[in-house]
Amino acid sequence: MATIYEVSKLAGVSLATVSRVMNNSSRVSPKTRQKVLAAMQKLDYHPNTIAQSLASKRSNSVGVLVSELHGPIFGSLVSGIEEELTRAGKFSIFAVGHSDGEKEKDGINFLISRNCDALIFHLEASSDEFLLAQKNSALPFVIVNRLVSGLEENCISLNNVKGGIEATRFLLKQGHRDIAYISGPLHWGDAGQRLAGHKTALAEFGIPFDPNIMVEGDYLVQSGYVAMKQLFGRKAKFTAVICANDEMAVGAMDAIREQGLSMPEDISLVGFDNVRWAPFLSPKLTTVNNPVNEMGRMAARWVLKNVYGINDRPIQTFFEPEIVVRESAGARV
Amino acid sequence: MATIYEVSKLAGVSLATVSRVMNNSSRVSPKTRQKVLAAMQKLDYHPNTIAQSLASKRSNSVGVLVSELHGPIFGSLVSGIEEELTRAGKFSIFAVGHSDGEKEKDGINFLISRNCDALIFHLEASSDEFLLAQKNSALPFVIVNRLVSGLEENCISLNNVKGGIEATRFLLKQGHRDIAYISGPLHWGDAGQRLAGHKTALAEFGIPFDPNIMVEGDYLVQSGYVAMKQLFGRKAKFTAVICANDEMAVGAMDAIREQGLSMPEDISLVGFDNVRWAPFLSPKLTTVNNPVNEMGRMAARWVLKNVYGINDRPIQTFFEPEIVVRESAGARV
DNA sequence: GTATAGAATGTAACCGCTTACATTTGCGTT
DNA sequence: AACGCAAATGTAAGCGGTTACATTCTATAC
């Protein structure tokens, strides 16, 4: 790779001038700019971004720490962030936290040591206190999919309570009164919020929450299957089931079919997340939309605005989920 | 952030010594090593990887260029690479090519400018010639999911022909004789290879290939639906359909159901890729496994071995796909 | 006690770029 | 023609590390 030095030699100017035309900052006379540009072209020069960021103490790149790189939720999030950042000419550096406290810290250190200009977090294991403490660190950051009190301006989040309400309300309006609930791990914020929404909607209709038709799962397919089996085993009466995410809903579907029941005739099923393959299921899954791609984009724009001063597109920090009605849930017969 | 300078001050040694204990290379006396370690701890020192890689001209990080960051295939690939690299203490830097020639080149330049020690490519738009030309560039690289002749040792690939054969053979063995085929875009290598496999298997059984029951799609859901409709429109006779990927299979499923037909009774359906949600479909999709996560891991190990000299795990460069039988395809009635 | 090899440590150049500051150039005035 | 000033360009000191080479210890042998 050619260096700035070779370019300056070829163009017959100093290093500083070459640097100037690269950053097209301080005025350079059109004539020399041309000479330099020509030299760059001729040498197929590409600036060494490592050296740039060491010297300038900024890197045009933002660090992104997510729990996973794959899967319908994280994949979508990551893509949203990447696209928006790339569009603005910034780079994304990813680190993976695997929902593990230590790995999340390692990831953050990695990103910091890469001279990132800002950080975008999707953290699951780290506590609110830890996040609050980061506030004082030099690097600006945004938190996606979580609302930390005291850090409201730094959060892009989803109204999970409303999501829970929407799902339950929809079923209530369809005439269901006995609605089973398969929850996510309650020690995670969103699972608790979704359940709270469920209870709220129930209360609205004057229906008491029955713990006997609720099971706590772990957000994975298998656990939806197991939970559904448990529900059947309890011989409790219910005409509809809400799953706190689509993964578990798919497991529940299997169990329902195994039971010889059909959806939505015998039982109505509602999921949460509106994962890409939700409409591929049969019956097509009615679910609550989780605009995770949009949230990723917003996190990126937050950084673009607050760190780079690029503010050409609107930013939304709080999202209201809506139910998307498909086939898996219907009127109570 | 503390710098190496502050550490050296606090420990009462020179920069070089601190650097030495970091890279625990040249022997340092246990006593001074302790002093330095203590100083690092006290200052919560984390080396600036940017500076390290500028100075050392290596970065402990490998560049990964993929077409997309999300989706069942790419997500899986990217995760496999990342996990394997992280396990070995190396970092991954991602760039996205979006199946666009220009963007792929930009991505490569970005990665090069980040001082990556090696590159992992999943390229779709770039030509074989381009890849061949890279061979002379200083940076070692591996190509995933593509077999470029002249670059065999640098490729991790899938036997797509065999995949096509397996899918078709399976149906033939089930008694099917009129097998429709919905292909991927034929200008892409894998789509052509899968189709070639299909034809080969047909020939084995002495059955002529009938272009009237084949449609070229674009690998997206919608195109599977459209292709299936076309097939029905042609009034051609067929008892089974192979889709060159699971995405299109899901679209085809919809069209089949709309036609009032059921699987596998009226029509057998086989997909390709064994995407994560293939078993969630109903009927559960019979498909050809595409071990893309494994291939990603192997690409990572290739780099670990050939670039970093870490060779503790086996490497497989050529993969033979196998059919995974589920419910969507059965015996011809 | 002295010579000496090898280990431990230090010195300083350098990686490729940015940028504060210094110097030169060009141009309008008088 | 001489002057002044702003614009253009150059100089050189970092950014935070690595590493070749030089120097200083330390321990052993005589």
Image (cartoon, coloured by chain):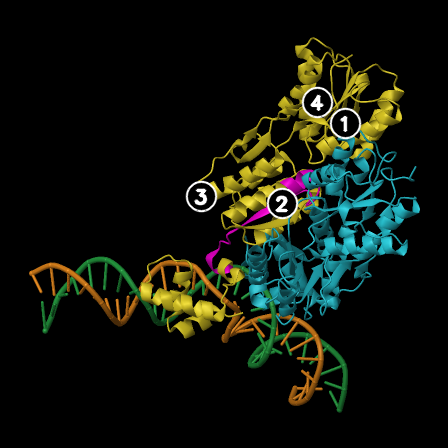
Chain colours: A cyan, B yellow, C green, D orange
**Marks 1, 4 in one chain:** yes
**Marks 3, 4 in one chain:** yes
Classify residue B36 as left or right of residue A130: left
| Residue A55 in view, yes or no | yes
Per the model, the C-alpha gap separating discs 3 and 2 is 22 Å
Per the model, the C-alpha gap separating discs 4 and 2 is 27 Å
Q: Nearer the viewer, residue A17 or B272?
A: B272
Per the model, the C-alpha gap separating discs 3 and 4 is 38 Å
Q: Which quarter of the picture shows residue B130?
A: top right
Q: Which residue is mark 2?
A: B65
Per the model, the C-alpha gap separating discs 1 and 3 is 44 Å
Question: On screen, D26 above or below B303?
Answer: below
Percent of width and height locating residue C1 = 10, 73
Q: Which disc is residue B283 wearing?
A: 1
Q: Secondary structure at mark 4?
A: helix
Classify residue A170 as left or right of residue A81: right
Amino acid type for the residue under numbered disc 1: Pro
Q: Please give the chain letter of the residue carrying mark 1.
A: B
Per the model, the C-alpha gap separating discs 2 and 1 is 35 Å
Front of the two marks 3 and 4: 3
The answer to whether marks 2 and 1 mark residues whose Cβ atoms lie closer than 8 Å is: no
Check residue B66 for magenta coloring. yes
Q: Please give the chain letter of the residue carrying mark 2.
A: B
Q: Which residue is mark 3?
A: B310
Check residue A106 for magenta coloring. no
